[in-house]
Amino acid sequence: MATRLTRPLALLAAGALLVSACSSGGGSPAPSAGAACEAGAASGTEIPDIVQGTFNVAMVLIGPHNDGGWSQAHYEGLIYLCENMKGAHVAYIENVPEGTDSEQVFRSLSRKGFDFIIGTSFGYMDPMATVAEEFPDITYLHLTGYKSNGRNFGNLFGAIEDMKYLAGMLAGSRAKLDGNPRLGYMATFPIPEEIRLGNAIMLGAKKTCPECTMDVRWINTWHDPVKEKEAAASLFDAGAQVVFTGADTPAVADVAQEKGKWGVTYDHPGSCKVDACLTAPYWIWGPEYVRIAEQVKAGTYKAGYEYFDADSGAMGLFGFMEGQTPQPGIKDLPAADVQLVKDTLAKMLAGTFNRFDVFAGPITDNTGAVILAAGAKLQQSDLDQFPPGAEGNACTTCMKWFAEGINGELPQ
Amino acid sequence: MTAGVPAGSPARAGRSLPWTVRLERRLEVPRWLPFATTLGAVAVALLLSGLVLWVAGGDPIAIFGHILRSSFGSLGVLSDTLVKATPLILTGLACALAFRMRLWNIGAEGQFLMGAWGASAIVLFPVVPDGTPAIVTIPLMMAAGMAAGALYGAIPGVLRAVRGVNEIIVTLMLNYVAALWIAFWVFGPWSEGGFQLSRAFPPEAWLPRLSDAADVVPALSGLTVHLGLAFGLVAAVLVHFLLFRSRRGYEIRLIGDSPRAARYAGVNVARTTVIVFAMSGALAGLAGMSEVAGVVHRLQQAISPGYGFTAIIVAYIAKLHPYGVVVAAIAFGALILAGREIQPSGIPAMIQGIILFSLIASEALLRYRIRVVRRVA
């Protein structure tokens, strides 16, 4: 009966498998940086499960744990936790898409009995909130979101705008020196976080290069090596001298290398390898994870909305932290510009210069309207929300503007 | 493949073994054979996957054991497996129905998305105000989801029936259109606070889940199986009835086996093409509705990790039989679920691939028999 059907059908099915394999984002090679800490990791494959009698920590990642960017920075934080917290056992699950799939992943980890579960992407927020209600004895930490239940579901993020601001200064200085005062910003989604970081870059660049302008490309993904490459190339082709990425991989620096221009990567110090990489604002999650995990273990963790600045020690600017040497592209920059970056960085690390100083008046937007008068500062709700702001957290000067010098309009 | 190619050529017979192996085309397929080859293919696939796992440094037996435990080992994970299987059952039925008539609907993914959109429109436009009782909201969402999927499915149907346009190309392309259509709505009119998601649906628009009764029966806590599973099972029965007990189903199968014979028999092929495509789209659309109303509770991108494509494989493995689709969908739901368990990811996708290719290869055994022929001196 069905034999006439089978051949085309088999082709179809094979094709479908290819399509679904591609759309799932593909796999990743095996090596595990935490082999020393993770006993099971030595075997090449592992199954996340708890170890009785230890403090069990699980982490859910949106990309591969070795993506050279966002996910790797978190994964290394997890390994740091494993190595620095007595009696801790860690496990991770990678490549978990936001939305539908993630709720089941969080529930499954909860059923296994993990004590502390970390979710590292914005879209995990609602699924984690749901599962946290079902498992009151487990503590959930969500990164980059804005929700907390005040009991066992808390939020954590940091002001990487501090470092983006400094990187903006360097990029402005570089573009000016090269005689092409044009920057590019490859942004992920038009959400307050990405607009805030773009504005921080522009505000920084204006300090060293008042005539600098910046183009923006929205790529609508956090992790897509191919798309990131294309967007970076498009910005360079449109005339940019230095391009920033808001996404997870080092693609922007690789493209800069090919084009003889400059790139600023993000998230992980290892992302800034090629000579064309000017610098990289990056995260150091380990100490924060240990701090919170210790609190969870001791029962003193207060779930809420935590937002740290550079003085937490949880972020860095590649080439400028202790023991690092600046990238080749920094060496011939005007000494005054580099000194300004070093001085501001020192103040940031000392806690005397924070995100509210980055966003201090006077600030004008790219339509000429005054966003902030001289001497005025933004509030936290202004920094991370669209009008009118969440309930009970209303913003007045909400993050829906582009700083002077940025070409383009925000999607309405 | 040409028929009956002898593996050992008789010309070289003199110095070789005293027997030859021949592949001969089967004239009749014994009833037990398809079942046996399927089982055999799965066994071979597991063996091959185990080998790969072993080479990659894992313990295959422990990993397979873990896959079983983590997809069927407890009530909780069984519930998760069924949640994953639900959209696969409905989209799998959508594919099976169309494939029966040799209509290659590769567009279940797009029809799924349009169904999700249609259902969402009921509460997001909104067609009915918040607070409308579920007994009104849910049937409306079902109707809207199925209608959206059916209309979307009818497009390639009409093009094929009227202009003879290749439906593979049209349905494949329409998948992208549907994904961008969803993107437009969640980035634009339905965006919540600039984020690429709609607001959450009001609770009246949520399909009831087992865990809703956890207040009364605590054991049900965390069991997220929702009413969509019932949609899938009922749909399987209906499709079975349609295909094997109705006149229309007879026509569908007749067209599938021999379009020319069907035409001589007076079957209106064009009309049936449009109808089958619309029904296929409606099933996939219902899957989309069931997923947004039963699992996601809002509209956003990435509501489907490729259910509409996996459905093609499900339909194939089920040999286009509606009840087989249910079984295959549950098996794939389990694989997707247990797949999350093995890190780094990618290995479970490989297992799926090996199973599929083993099954395709095993088809050869259905059409050919291996015969060992003793040489007569």
Image: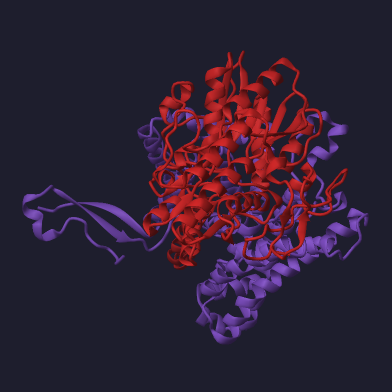
Chain colours: A red, B purple
- In the image, what residue occupies the spot 10% across and 60% down? B11
Q: Tell which of B309 and B131 is nearer to you.
A: B131
Does A117 sit left or right of B122 as displayed? left
> What percent of the width, then of the height, locates residue B54?
38, 32
Above or below B218: residue B339: below
- In the image, what residue occupies the spot 62% across and 26% down? A289
- Name the residue furthest front: A336
Quadrant in which residue A369 is drawn: bottom right
> What percent of the width, then of the height, locates residue B251?
61, 75
- Name the residue furthest left: B15
Does A80 sit left or right of A190 as displayed? left
Quadrant in which residue A357 is drawn: top right
- In the image, what residue occupies the spot 53% across and 53% down? A172
Above or below A7: residue A137: above
Q: Tell which of A396 and B359 is nearer to you.
A: A396
Task: Examine the rendering and report whether any part of residue B315 can be seen.
Answer: no
- In the image, what residue occupies the spot 41% across and 61% down? B28
> What percent of the width, then of the height, locates residue B114?
69, 65
> Which image quarter holds the N terminus of chain B?
bottom left
Q: Tell which of A350 and B100 is nearer to you.
A: A350
